Image: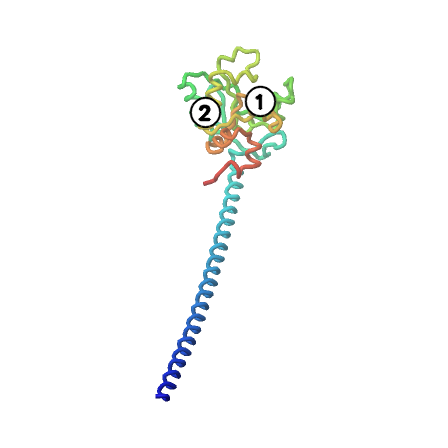
Amino acid sequence: MKKNLKICIFIIILICSVVGAAYVIINKHAQNKAAEEARRAAEIAAQQEAARQAAEEAAAKAREEQIAAEKDEWYLILVNSDNAMPDDFDIETADVEDGYVIDSRVQEPLKEMLADCRDAGYSPRIISTFRTRETQQYLYDHTANKADTAIPGHSEHECGLAADIIDAASLGWADPLIADQEDMPAQKWLMQHCHEYGFILRYPKDKEDVTKIIYEPWHYRYVGKKHAAAIMQSGICLEEYLSNMETYYDPE
Ligand SMILES: [Zn+2]
């Protein structure tokens, strides 16, 4: 019996040792596996983050390039006192009405805007569109106020992208080109709807310090529909828009 007891105890100890060792081994293995899984998860997360960042950077760069390319489009040319039109500027004009001509690419939107304004019951009247260098020179030489007249080579009228439009009822005024033009019915309609045709009111109120041109509630400039909407809805002028276009314009 004594011998059997010893064997029994030995067997129990042996079993306990085996179970204990197995437990330690299994536990260790599980720990290693968990650590490995955690390491792999961290590695995958790092790869995903790097891919996300790379995609984000590529998208930002593509957007930047799209905006830069858009800025080079003919309809976004910036012509003001600091920026002359290029010497090699080439223009093809087309008739609008009453002998007034404009850049042929702007002919349709301008005619459409005038027609819709008339359909709405108003009387818009063009008083200036495309001007040759000679005409701009003449105007500049003969104006009483040189500060409010663009230097030849610096006028949007020479680019063929601008039109001065007044309400026909103001034709009898001593000078229809005054701020009161904004109260005329045709002008109110034009200011409200011009962006739908790709035009902006180029020299807004309270932007004289930026445009260096007085408030002109008659001078409309073509920039294309999407830019016109962004500019008119933001209440900014073209200079502000072009210097900070990524804030206002989404190329998508
Ligand atoms: Zn003008």
- Relative depth, front residue between 202 and 208: 208
Q: Is residue 57 left or right of residue 27?
A: right
What's the residue type where badge 1 is placed? Tyr
Give me the residue at 55% from left, 25% from top: 204
What's the residue type where badge 2 is placed? His
Task: Indicate the quadrant of ligand 1 in the picture.
Answer: top right
Label 1 CA crowd tier, 10 Å (few <14, some 14–19, many 20+)? many
Who comes first in sequence, dot 2 or dot 1? Answer: 2
Give me the residue at 49% from left, 57% from top: 46
Mark 1 Cβ inside 8 Å of ligand 1: no
Q: Which residue is mark 1?
A: 215
Mark 2 Cβ inside 8 Å of ligand 1: no
Position of residue 144 relative to residue 12, above or below, is above
Position of residue 48 relative to residue 217, above or below, is below
Asked where in the image residue 119 lies, by quadrant, the reply is top left
- Relative depth, front residue between 193 and 29: 29
Q: Secondary structure at mark 2?
A: helix
Q: Secondary structure at mark 1?
A: loop
Q: Which residue is mark 2?
A: 193
Position of residue 89 relative to residue 37, above or below, is above
Label 2 CA crowd tier, 10 Å (few <14, some 14–19, many 20+)? some
Q: Position of residue 70 (x, y in %)?
A: 51, 39
Q: Position of residue 28 (x, y in %)?
A: 45, 71
